Amino acid sequence: MHKPPYLILYDSSNVDVVLNHICNLRFIPNTLSRLVAIAFDENAELALRQKHPMIPNVLIDLKPLVDYLDPGMQNRGYLIYTLALVVHAKICASLALRGIDFWSMHQDTLWTQNFDLMNVEDRYPDSNLLFDTIGNEVESYMLSYQSPDSSIMTYLCGHHHYKCQFLPQWMVSSYNYFEGPRENVPILIQLDGGKRPGESKMDVMRRGRFVFRHDNGTCDERTFYKLREYVKFGFPDAIRKDGSLKENLYSKTLYVLKNLFNIDPGNRKFYLTIHQSLI
């Protein structure tokens, strides 16, 4: 590939989300050709290969390991989730070791515009991709500490040896976007929240009107061209009206002092510590 691939990982539980994501990318030039998929079970790999044989699709079968776990274990679901995160880190370390640049993407991300046109690789020429700089260190850390890879990578970026760059929220955001004033629509929005009890990820997509695929498998062009409008006004009950998202004077002062003395200015180490305590 002439440009770093968009890498997504999936299994049978979210093939429908992957297919929906592909229909989102179909209407954006120079994106679907960069998509690379890694399946964690045979059924998922086969389902995607049958519908989109042109997309590079690799199988790393975790089913034997998952089946080995006692079905009665109280934390079985979290162990499976952690297993996927560790394998994710190993994949990223393997690519980085070979000097292969890539984007680690999520299939539950909405593309409202063409991310490729941002030329992010050229915008930050002095910064390595996050996975490139941490390699196997994340893998070894994850085998000892229970925490998502995102918090560990954010933590490592607090070290002066790592050349990290954080993309602005107007470019890439999460479900938190729907909780704020929505003044600008980001280019990428990951739907990493908003699920109601009993809902699947596709249920959340439907509720937000973010379904790009018809029942017959064809892609819905109208949804893509209306996407920015749907994002702007979607999930109205998610908007926080209590002012909890606003920074107070104490937070602003603390941030300035931490930056001045370079003491974990982004609260990265603090975030990891809090998550570890919760686990």
Image (spheres, helix red, strand yellow):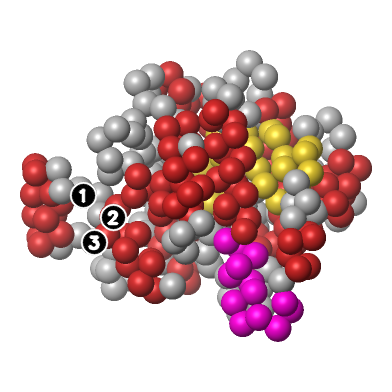
From this viewpoint, which residue is outermost toward the top? Answer: 2
Proximity of marks 2 and 1: CB atoms separated by less than 8 Å: yes
Q: Is 235 inside the magenta-drawn segment?
A: no
Between disc 3 and disc 1, the foreground one is 1
Res 264 label: 1
Proximity of marks 2 and 3: CB atoms separated by less than 8 Å: no
Residue that numbered label 3 is attached to: 246
Residue 82: image location, x then y, percent: 57, 61
Instruction: Characterize the local packing of mark 3: few (<14), some (14-19) or many (20 or more) Cα atoms within 10 angstroms.
Output: few
Q: Which residue is drawn at 78% across and 37% down?
A: 57
Residue 45: image location, x then y, percent: 83, 47
Residue 230 makes an appearance in the image: no
Cα distance between the residues tagged 3 and 1: 21 Å
Residue 162: image location, x then y, percent: 33, 34
Res 269 label: 2
Cα distance between the residues tagged 2 and 3: 22 Å
Q: Which residue is drawn at 34% across and 31% down?
A: 163
Q: What element carries label 1?
A: loop
Q: Is mark 2 on a helix, strand or loop?
A: helix
